[in-house]
Amino acid sequence: MSKRKSWKIQTKLFFLIVVTGFGCILLFRFLWLQKWNVGYFLTSSPSSEPPFFRQPENDIWARIESEAIKYNVPDSEDDLAGQEAIAPYLSLADKYTGLYIYGLEDGLYRAGRFPEILMQDGSYAAFFRMGIGWTSGAGERSIQQPVKFKNGYASVTVVFYHAYGFIVPWFLVCLFLCIAIFLLVVLFFVSRKLRIVLRLKEHVLQMSSGDLKTPVFDAGEDELGILARELDQLRCALRENILQEQAAHKSNQELITALSHDLRTPLTILNGYLEIIRRNQNQDMQAEYIGRCIQKTEDIKEMTDRMFAYALMYDDAALQKGQTQTEQLPASYVLDLLREHVDFLRLAGFQAELHQGDDLDRAGLCFGNRAMIKRVLLNLFSNMIKYADKKAAVVISSVFMDELRIRMKNKVKVGAEHQDDLARDPFQIGMKNVCKLMEEMRGAVLVETDGTEFLVELRFEAVEKPMAGA
């Protein structure tokens, strides 16, 4: 996918101003060149010239020619008497017309009258003169021809300014139109960028209010586009961090709950052994029972230490990494733990049967974690004590082939009087712990139940035996 060319906002604005300004200048030039066509279009008859231009000129020029025969042309510019005598003739020109008389043969100035509009004071006259300067005399029309006076022919020049009644407004219309187009284009560009800024502000407010699911829109490749992409990446990072924090909190709570549940099991076993010792039963086994009590106190200490560590460390990911490392354990280690729990089941009044393969004591190694295997067995045997029927035999078997398999089968208590036991553990915390722990040790759990019988099978991955003589 090709990457779009990135232009800075400053560069875009510069080229926009240059291109738009050049285009507006060309537009103004075109409209200004069309001024007379527009003037002709505004007349009632397209074939005639605009009334604001031709009609006043024709009327004034007709009177100038007809009245000239009544007046003498002054001999020179300094002929005061002649100047005073021809003044009524010069007043034939209206305030938008200039009238000047020159000698026909020598071309010297004899008399004349400037347009009154150029001589007056006031805002309108000033604006009129300013309009002439703006348009560089584009509306000025001059006619020169010989005219017969009382004392002979003279050259008469008439300068008409009537067209400025249209030229100046048209100039202003063209000027304001081009300026308006220029400003509209620039302001449109600026407004688009401002709308992007406002949308980014709305996204920031949404993020601050907790909405981290709505993605930030694509704002292009300029600085605002980069800001939008970085803001979206920030949104994703914040959302991921919050989700991880929530998951870590949930995992932390589950682990504390699991450890609390596991803690009750060795306490129950410890209480059973102490009760046997207190009643002075099986005196020959009391030394072994005392040793088991000491072992259970060590297990309780280990669990409480771990529980305090989980409580103090909010994120348990690093802790779990250290706790879940597996090692190579002999299968006989698991067998010793099974025998210990089977003995306790028997002391608790259960008919426990342990079946094992003939070569299990001499079997190979399997992957596991000593602390976690203890927790797995504690959870399973604790569930048996809670839910297993003492009237039926609890059958436990173990075999080592391509993996170490341990099967536990028991009858489930039935009757309304046993429903309270099930209600106290609705989420089956013990089995959840077992599945999680076995998964972390690269093992597997198989659970089967039909409501009357319960079967669970643990599978530990075996370590490949080295070949003889290797």
Image (cartoon, rainbow, N blue to C red):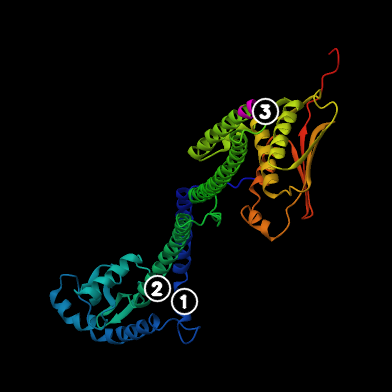
Whether residue 1 is visible:
no
Residue indicated by mark 3: 285
Magenta segment boundaries in residue numbering: 286-290
What separation in Å lies between label 1 and label 3 (alpha carbons)? 124 Å
Contact, mark 1 vs mark 2 (Cβ under 8 Å): yes
- Residue 285 placement (x, y as % from top left): 67, 28
What separation in Å lies between label 3 and label 2 (alpha carbons)? 121 Å
135 relative to 229, above or below: below
Residue type indicated by callout 2: Trp
User: N-terminal of the two: label 3 or label 2?
Assistant: 2
Residue 183 in which image quadrant: bottom left
Sort mark 1 into few (<14), some (14-19) or many (20+) by Cα contacts within 10 Å.
some
- Residue 77 placement (x, y as % from top left): 18, 70
Overall secondary structure of the magenta stretch? helix
Residue 323 shown in magenta: no
For label 1, the SS is: helix
- Residue 27 placement (x, y as % from top left): 48, 64
What separation in Å lies between label 1 and label 2 (alpha carbons)? 9 Å
Residue 38 has which mark? Answer: 1
Of 77 and 152, which appears nearest the observer? 77
Of 446 and 352, which appears nearest the observer? 352
Residue 170 has which mark? Answer: 2
Figure quadrant of the C terminus: top right
Of 141 and 276, which appears nearest the observer? 276
Seen as rendered, the residue at the extreme left is: 81
- Residue 293 placement (x, y as % from top left): 60, 31
Residue shown at the point (31%, 65%) measured from the top left: 133
Sort mark 3 into few (<14), some (14-19) or many (20+) by Cα contacts within 10 Å.
few
Q: Nearer the viewer, mark 3 or mark 2?
A: 3
For label 2, the SS is: helix
